[in-house]
């Protein structure tokens, strides 16, 4: 499983972004992981992004390039 790194400091902030495009950083050396439709797994890694906050992981469902739900 591959994972995108998010630009959100908390899962709450990510959930508040439902209906908006996902802020992310690609991490795979094998090609793009982002899908505008379907489910993605994301992580907030403060040591990588430098944004602070706690590390978290989430399943994000996308529809037409917008966040539909966060689990």
Image: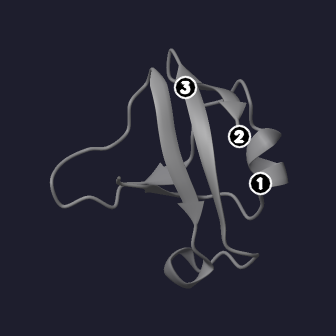
Q: Which mark is residue 11?
A: 1
Q: Which mark is residue 21?
A: none
Query: Residue 21: horizontal and vertical position, in percent?
Result: 58, 32
- Report the residue at 60% width, 43% height from top: 59
User: Which residue of the protein is positioned furthest toward the bottom in this rendering?
Assistant: 47
- Report the residue at 26% width, 58% height from top: 28
Q: Give the CA distance from mark 3 to mark 2.
A: 12 Å
Of marks 1 and 2, which one's residue comes earlier in the chain?
A: 1
- Callout 2: SS: loop
Query: Residue 47: horizontal and vertical position, in percent?
Result: 55, 85
Residue annotated with mark 2: 71
Q: Give the CA distance from mark 1 to mark 2.
A: 9 Å
Q: Quadrant of residue 19?
A: top right
User: Which residue of the protein is positioned furthest toward the top in this rendering?
Assistant: 64
Q: Callout 3: 10 Å neighbours few (<14), some, many (20+)? A: many
Q: Callout 2: 10 Å neighbours few (<14), some, many (20+)? A: few
Q: Nearer the viewer, mark 3 or mark 2?
A: 2
Residue annotated with mark 3: 62
Of marks 3 and 2, which one's residue comes earlier in the chain?
A: 3
Q: Are marks 1 and 2 in contact (CB under 8 Å)?
A: no
Q: Give the CA distance from mark 3 to mark 1.
A: 16 Å
- Callout 1: SS: helix
In this rendering, the answer to whether 36 lies above or below 56 is above
Q: Are marks 3 and 2 in contact (CB under 8 Å)?
A: no
Query: Residue 42: horizontal and vertical position, in percent?
Result: 53, 52
Left-right relation of 17 to 29: right
Left-right relation of 62 to 31: right
């Amino acid at each position: 499983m591959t994972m995108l790194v998010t630009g959100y400091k908390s899962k709450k902030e990510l959930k508040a972004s439902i209906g908006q495009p996902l802020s992310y950083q690609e991490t795979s050396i094998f090609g793009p992981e982002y899908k505008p439709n379907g489910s993605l797994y994301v992580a907030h890694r403060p040591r990588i992004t430098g944004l602070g906050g706690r590390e978290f992981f989430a399943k994000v469902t996308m529809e037409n390039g917008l966040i539909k739900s966060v689990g």
